Amino acid sequence: MKMKSIGMVIAGAALMVVQANADPNLLVNGSFENIAPATSKVSSGFGAIPGWTGPVAGDTGVDVLGGVKNPGAEDGVNAAYFHNQDGYAEQTAATTIQSGLSYDLQFWTMNIDTYNATWSGAGQGDITVEVYYGNDANSIVTRDYNLGLSSNGNTPGTWVLNDLALAPGDIPGAAIGQNIGIKISNTSTGVAGSWIYVDNVTLVPEPTTCALLGFGTLATVLGLRRRRA
């Protein structure tokens, strides 16, 4: 009977791992696609973008089919663009934060000023990302990414991968059981206008090393017991 119970635990854990791997990204429409009409930019914030919310903004939104400043998209055909004087984009995932899990946020950026400096005088680009629980008043972490004058030293007009990893110890107890969310904004200063492109945003939960080791140990114990039997 004990053997059967242990086997059921392992099978259940394996099923959860398979399910997690099947659709790991907690965010909806992280590549800012599925916009109607799909023929022109959306410069009125993110209220009309599936999965995202944000205030009505003067010049922040989604570049459809690379037709605005034509940098192209990192993933799909669209990319979000953020002006430093207008708005933000945020999304609260339907999934709640679980104890013992790590969370990895990745997103791609391009400092559009480096693609064509005439748009805002080759300004230095800064993007700020907040990970929160419940709503954006409950911040878990807020981090600034300085993109410099040439996309972190890369060739102007190229996409740069950014990463924000959260270990279980980074997540406050009050966040457990609450929905996780992210907020993105352009916080560039010192220039009249700065545009930064963002695309392919993913937020993935990951089991801790200890949990994986525990799963492996349990499977090993079960295997030894079977051989002894």
Image: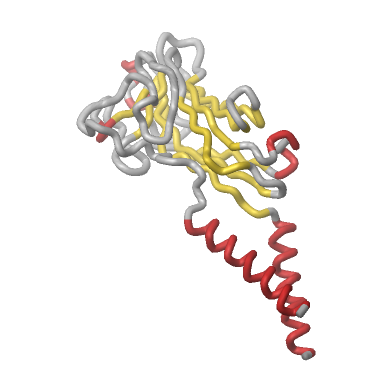
The answer to whether one can see residue 101 in this image is yes
Between 138 and 206, the residue placed more toward the observer is 138
Residue displayed at 62% across by 22% down: 137
Residue 28 position within the rendered picture, expressed as x and y whole percent measured from the top left: 44, 41
Between 96 and 118, the residue placed more toward the observer is 96
When the figure is inspected, residue 77 is found, relative to residue 183, above or below; the finding is below
Residue 182 position within the rendered picture, expressed as x and y whole percent measured from the top left: 54, 32
The answer to whether one can see residue 113 in this image is no
Q: How is the image coloured?
A: secondary structure
For residue 6, what is the image quadrant? bottom right
For residue 55, what is the image quadrant? top left
When the figure is inspected, residue 63 is found, relative to residue 9, above or below; the finding is above
Residue 111 position within the rendered picture, expressed as x and y whole percent measured from the top left: 42, 27
Residue 92 position within the rendered picture, expressed as x and y whole percent measured from the top left: 52, 34
Determine the residue located farthest toward the front in the rendered image. 1
For residue 37, what is the image quadrant? top left
Image side of residue 222 versus residue 69, left or right: right
Between 158 and 30, the residue placed more toward the observer is 30
Residue displayed at 49% across by 47% down: 25
Image quadrant in which the C terminus is located = bottom right
